[in-house]
Amino acid sequence: MTTHDLTLISATDGSALPREPFVARHLIDGQWRDSADGATFVRHSPAHGVPVTRAAEGGTVEAEAAVATARRAFDDGRWASLSGKDRSTLLLRVADLIDRDRDRIALMETLESGKPISQARAEIEGAADLWRYAAALARALRGDSHNSLGADMLGIVLKEPVGVVSIITPWNFPFLIVSQKLPFALAAGCTAVVKPSELTPATTVILGELLVEAGLPDGVVNIVLGYGQPVGALMTTHDDIDMVSFTGSTAVGKAIVAAASGTLKKVSLELGGKNPQVVFADADLDSAADAIVFGIYFNAGECCNSGSRIIVHKDIADEVTQRVIALSRRVPFGDPLHPDTKVGAIISPEHQNKIDGYVQSAGKAGATIRLGGGPLTVPGLPGQFYQPTVVSGVTAEMAIAREEIFGPVLSVLEFNTFDEAIALANDGAYGLSAGVWSENVHTCLEFTRRVQAGTVWTNTWMDGFAELPFGGVKESGLGRELGRFGLDEYLEVKTVQMRIGRTRTPWVHDR
Ligand code: NAD
């Protein structure tokens, strides 16, 4: 395929590129610190190739210091003993500061991740909304009471913060994902140690600056920059950590469960997905085709919610595939700094190779590459990009149908009957999200009941709301984020039983 078949956005004039890399340090006990051994690492823009961040590379010393500080800050009650109103007020202040600095945060997000600037701005706005929603929850936090246990008994169920939480995040939505966790943990009264991905540290550091500016007490949130080893590993094994909240790959999620089992920490996991969109013959194909294209190319397919498997009725399979290919050619791929770009760069050369490996092996296994299927050259940019890719004739046992590719690569599978569609949708280790396209409400409802997924979209794809819980079943995760359930993750339940009067029957009787 030649690239003039696609909609390409060439390099901008580069005036938004930084002259000097952003300097990212650890935040420990309210102080910005370099690593004790002076180690740093540099992040280059995946689209532009220039250095954009120089970050302190944390080791055991920094991770230990952050955990000890977060522990002290929890145990002395400087945050947990504040009223819900005071915690809420601070979270609202942070939301306002995020809005104020939206463009600065979005630019760093784009420079480190390669995602389009318009999308990054929308994500930062969405993140501010999560801080506001969590602020509302902080004031609504309450337990339960039982007044019908008998005349002499009152039962009270208290909700208490879990304690010190390790928050470990990935590179694909750095600011949004930390905002799905941290404000909820803070609303509950927890303290935290946060580690962003080594590929995207900057915006978590900016968030730290805003927390300091908002007046969060020192030590309540600590940020350690660096790699899974040793920082992430220490954050998941340390005795002083009560809970780990992790978003990332299923492989690392499993390693974290094993690591955390030594001290039986509470673990909350948001992991991978291989999400099906099932298209029935009576579907509104205009809407479905557009949502399929959005579902696979959004964030260059580097998205846990990527709609990477289309399961389409045989009668309309060819038409749907052709519509999707035609729309794919119109999606603007290119410089993430250009306001019109909808798909930017791939996070790293290694990841680009992994994506391409899946596509080439599908071709060898007998699938047909109908569009794309290779790296994309964007005029004026040295970074890595991948062509919009549509692969048809995919069967359920192929790796491209089962494994998370995390790139702009759509697999098309076909079905005849409803039962076949459900069997294909549920075939596999993941269970994050699923979609159904049909004008028949009974088809949609039956699908919704039978599909194994944490989220089901009917006649839509990838909408999200602060009010609605998000998470996966099977190997897509444990627990939920967002909504009221998102707050519950960071709360323990304590049961209090109060006797009224001196009515208890003695266990030991007078002789
Ligand atoms: P990753 O698992 O490689 O890394 C995630 C984080 O874990 C990083 O901060 C990394 O440094 C850290 N880490 C690595 N090894 C560790 C260890 N042994 N102990 C503790 N921490 C460790 O994931 P990634 O490549 O950054 O992100 C992509 C993955 O994230 C995909 O699988 C995607 O599906 C998943 N994801 C899931 C959701 C969701 O909500 N379900 C959202 C976004 C991304």
Image (spheres, helix red, strand yellow):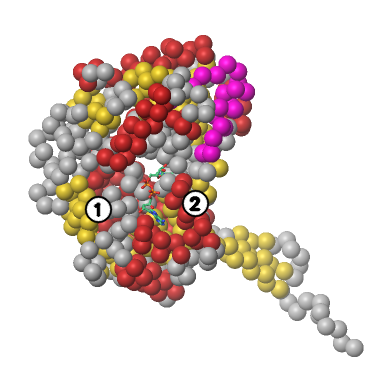
Q: Is residue 181 above or below residue 421?
A: below
Amino acid type of the residue that numbered disc 2 sits on in the rendered structure: Lys
> Which of these two is toward me, 82 or 202?
202
Determine the CA span between mark 2 and mark 1.
27 Å
Q: Which residue is mark 1?
A: 202
Residue at image coords 33%, 43%: 172
Q: Residue at x 9, y 40 (%)?
A: 15
Q: Locate residue 493, reporting x and y percent.
A: 58, 62
Q: Residue at x 46, y 38 (%)?
A: 273
Q: Position of residue 317 (x, y in %)?
A: 47, 14
Using the rendered view, name the quadrant where residue 368 is placed. Answer: top left
Task: Give the image location of residue 403, x and y in percent.
Answer: 46, 36
User: Residue 114: where, in percent of width, then height?
Assistant: 25, 40
Q: Residues within 10 Å of mark 2 (few under 14, many from 20)?
A: some
Helix, strand or loop at label 2? It is helix
Would you call the spot at circle 1 few (<14 residues within 10 Å), some (14-19), or many (20 or more)?
many
Q: Secondary structure at mark 1?
A: helix
Q: Which residues are magenta?
A: 411-431
